[in-house]
Image (cartoon, rainbow, N blue to C red):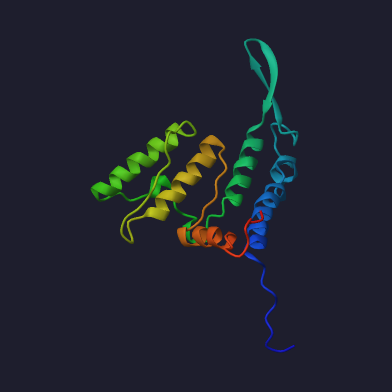
Amino acid sequence: VRGRRPARASPAQRAAQLLELVASSQSLLSAENTPAAMECPICNGSRWKSVEVDGVERLTRCDCWRGAVVDRLMQEARVPSRYARCELATFEHDMNTQREAFRRATRFVEAFPAVDKGLLLFGPHGVGKPHLAVGILKEVVRTKGARGYFFETRELLRLVRDTYNRSVEETEM
């Protein structure tokens, strides 16, 4: 039928689809199935290496396993391509407020995950809030093995709003 739009998913269905997408993305790049695992000269693809500690030989995870985990977590983080080059190291902090934001961001990364409070980045347009947020996310993923997701405020608020339906007493998830 011409001009007819496909049926739109309910807000609860869209929220469930988002949760399913996040859950399924965890298995998309199994660390054991990446090409790097097959060609590692240290572990020969086993993801384990032998180390000697106090004269005793032990097994520990190979560096290639850690790299594959970080790569997978970075892909799952949903960082838009326009922010791909954003790093804490490349954040330009020319103004006092930017310097203070940068200091707090680096302290947050160093203390993570043992932090009492999160960070709220606010300020005028063009001061680098997304740059700093992406830099923090990348650092905690790389250095702490954390899992995180990038959402722009409008997108996150829309997702939250779409899960709320006044005509239904209970929202499905």
User: Toward the viewer: 104 or 2?
Assistant: 2
User: Toward the viewer: 44 or 28?
Assistant: 28
Residue shown at 57% from the left, 37% from the top:
145
Instruction: Give the x, y percent position of residue 13.
Output: 67, 62
Residue 165 falls left or right of residue 123: right
Instruction: Give the x, y percent position of residue 107.
Output: 38, 35
Residue shown at 39% from the left, 49% from the top:
90
User: Toward the viewer: 149 or 46?
Assistant: 149
The total number of labels drawn is 0
Residue shown at 59% from the left, 59% from the top:
163
Residue 97 falls left or right of residue 24: left
Residue shown at 53% from the left, 55% from the top:
79
Residue 156 versus residue 98 in the image, above or below: below
Name the quarter where the N terminus is drawn.
bottom right
User: Toward the viewer: 140 or 66?
Assistant: 140
Residue 13 versus residue 32 in the image, above or below: below
Toward the left, the furthest residue is 96
| Picture quadrant where residue 16 is located | bottom right
Toward the bottom, the furthest residue is 2
Residue 160 falls left or right of residue 86: right
| Picture quadrant where residue 32 is located | top right
Instruction: Give the x, y percent position of residue 15.
Output: 63, 58
Residue 51 versus residue 130 in the image, above or below: above
